[in-house]
Amino acid sequence: MQKIKSLMARQGLKSPQESIADLSPVEDFRIPSKEEMREMREQPIDPQAEQEIINSIQEVYYSNDSFDMVQHELEKLPPELNLQELEEYRDQLKRQQAAVSKKVADLILEKQPSYVKELERVTSLQTNLQLAAVICTNARRQLSISKEDFTEASLGLLANQRRRHLLTGLLKSLRTIKTLQRTDVRLSEMLEEEDYPGAIQLCLECQKAASTFKHYSCISELNSKLQDTLEQIEEQLDVALSKTCKHFDVSHYTRVQLAYTLLEKTQTAMDQLHMHFTQAIHNTVFQVVLGYVELCAGNADTKFQKMQYKDLCTHITQDSYVPCLSDLCKALWEVMLSYHRTMQWHEEQDKEEPPPTTDEAGAADTEEAVVDHSYVKKKLEHGLTRIWQEVQLKVKAYLLGTDMSNFKYDDFIVVLDVISRLMQVGEEFCGSKSELLQESIKRQSVNYFKNYHRTRLEELRMFLENETWELCPVKSNFNIAQLHEFKFMGQSRSPSVSPSRQVLSSQDQVLSSKDQEVLSLFQHFSQEGNPFERHIDNKDEETEDVLASNGYESDELEKCVYQDYDSDSDVPDELKQDYVDEQTGDVPLKSASRETLRSRKKSDYSLNKGSNAPILTNTTLNVIRLVGKYIQMMNILKPIAFDVIHCVSQLFDYYLYAVYTFFGRNDMYESSGPGLISSRLRTTLNRIQESLIQMDSLGEGSSSVHGGPGEDRKEKVPSPHLSQLVVLTASETLYGLAQRVVATESLVFLAEQFEFLQSHLDTMMPAAKKPFLQQFYSQTVSTASELRKPIYWVVAAKALDYEQMLLLMAGVKWDIREIMSQHNVYVDVLLKEFEEFNKRLGDVSRHVRVPLPVSNVLWEHCIRLANRTLVEGYGNVKKCSNEGRALMQLDFQQFLMKLEKLTDMRPIPDKDFVETYIKAYYLTENDMEQFIKNHREYSMKQLANLVNVCLGSHINKKARQKLLAAIDDIDRPKR
């Protein structure tokens, strides 16, 4: 189109708009020049040829209107010009131009009628437009008149109304702005009231309102102030959140969490909360320890405040250690309780959550809330272990900061008890086994217990060497559960009840045995109280009085001490019966009723037949108390249970060895008594001597106890020495029988208490070490009663004058020829000795109750020794007739008849031993040979006497030699 226009311009044509001005219907065209007309005529008139010429025009000529044809053609000229070629190319361009011009002229002529017609339409349109302009001018004039007459008044009213409405809105906005400017006062009041949700809600509403009026210049400053206020609220909210770490308050924490929810910072709040708990633990323990350190230091030295907590713990004194530890655990309990209650609050909130909404906005809020709740739950669960780890580290630093090896026992037990309770808290808090605390307390306990046990063994040796073996009067219903050291095993629990089934009061169910707890510690002390308060309060609890009500206050009281001291009319019958049952098990004597004891003639050498008070000494009581203390430590410190039980066994071993050394080891009589010491007892005594007794210091005293270079020497104790106040050589006291009874029976009583404790010790012993405990009971504890034989054998060997009896028997003539009806004098002397022994035994029983097993052993030993003395006397006979043998039988029968009146023991010990020997006098040669083989209990001398005296006149020398050779063969293995 542009090219057509340019062509028209070149040919002098005008556009329609330009043609409208002169309104001439036909425009004269420019007449081509003669040259052009000639060229046009010279052009072929064949349309097809003309079209081919047009098509041969290069495309570049049609590219755009700004195309410079001259420049284009000039650029195409070759470097070397050829006139002929140039003229030919010029002619070609002219032919192309002529073809284009002709084509354009043909098109113009072809469209001439349409052009004329269109030009007429334009002229008509111009006329119409002029008419329209006149009409519009008239309309505007008429509208101007209407505006002046009608519209201005009405529109003025509308404008005023609109202005009034705007001013009313402006007044409302100004009032709102005024209220916004006064909100800071209300916000301060709400913060003082700790109404954090209300303050945040108000602040957010004010911010929203401020954004609405941000086009006012005064609001921009207010908006900045509100933002500062909101940040201040967040800071105070963080402080309020930190307060919940020590004292959790439901309403306070609810407000704080609601405030964080409004701020949409629930997760941030949880992160801050854990940081505050960690900081609270550190600050709490530091302040507690610092307070005690400064109190003990007695001055206001500020250097302690700059110390690290670990270094500060090393400045705690021994006197303030336990109170400080208690206060430390109380403070840590408050922090953990707050954390526990925080978790409870969130769990309750999860249960009270409303059901999710179905609309999109509500669904989005619900999904965000679920994410927050999930985050909070995981954070709290992970925080349990983190908080407990912090607690352990702080307490561990405190425990290891002081050397407790020299602590008093009660103080150390309190420490163990507090730490045990703390570990119980940890297990309930997060299920932790408290490895750090266990390791720390085990290290301190091993150190303490090693030193403690060594000191106690030395004390036990001192007690034993100063012990006069006088009876310690206790109530008849005494049992170890009444001692303060065994309170932990239950108040009124009988020995037959296992420790795991003891009955406790409702309060002790929570505080004494984890197995018996109905409520957890966090449930029980959720609102008030503290699980670490009872330990210090009970430390000075009065111990039950287990001693008899009237001790040795005067000589008169001393005489009747065993008549009156155990009057137990105020003791319920059930308790009396329980005690009898508890003490005995299957032993017939102790399980018998009081009526049976009274009816049994001379069954128990005691002035008060109804009394069954235990026989024990002060040392025995101290050992029992010491065992109780050891078991207390073992209950609290299960990891060192085996070490403790091993030390408990050493206490019993040393006591047993001391009793044997003092009263049972007598070389003069020990070997003469047949089977007095069993192989088991001898093995036990040898084991104790090798493992516990420091033999090389027997005569050096205690100064050499620590002199040994090896650790083994440190673990051994010198052998004890009997006190010089104990006299064992006086015949009127039956060679210290009272002391022997007290010592031996106190050991038996101690063994019975160990039997009672066996089930409890077994539950504490690690499975791998239980064989040690079983062996201790089977090889050591059970042998305590076996010491009666060697100890009382010494008394029996001296109580009667057996040598005098042998001399009297040697003066008797046994080769008589007639049957005698009167027994010999030595029988009366022997019976008189027994009567004197019985009298002395009765005298001893006035001071010390002689139990039936003791009297039985004494009588058995004396009768057995008397019978063996008779056999020895008969074995010394040089000549004997049949009538003499009859006299022997008469003497022995008279002895038995009188003896049975003195004692209830049946059958008489070694009765057959004597009768069989006397009857052997009647045997033939063949029977005698069989007798020698079957009766090896007789000595070679006694058997040889039978051969020489009884058969000497009836057999030849060869037969006699044969029998004597048989005797010698029997005796050879013994040598």
Image (cartoon, rainbow, N blue to C red):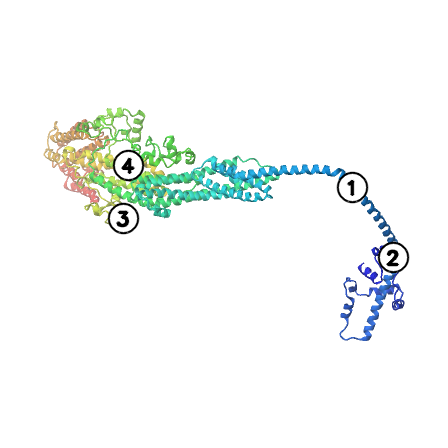
> Camera-side residue: 365 or 157?
157
Pointer 2 or 4: first along the chain = 2
Tell me which corner region of the image, top left, top right, bottom left or bottom right, holds residue 776: top left
In the rendered image, residue 209, in percent from the top left (x then y), is placed at 58, 40
Q: Which residue is mark 3?
A: 712
Pointer 4 or 1: first along the chain = 1
For the image, the number of numbered tags is 4
Indicate whether 31 appears above or below 552.
below
Q: Quadrant of the N terminus?
A: bottom right
Q: Which residue is mark 2?
A: 111
- What's the residue type where badge 3 is placed? Asp
3 vs 2, front mark: 2
Circle 4 — which element? helix
- Residue 80: assigned label: none
Mark 2 burial class by Cα count in 10 Å: few <14, some 14-19, many 20+: few
Circle 3 — which element? helix
Pointer 3 or 4: first along the chain = 4
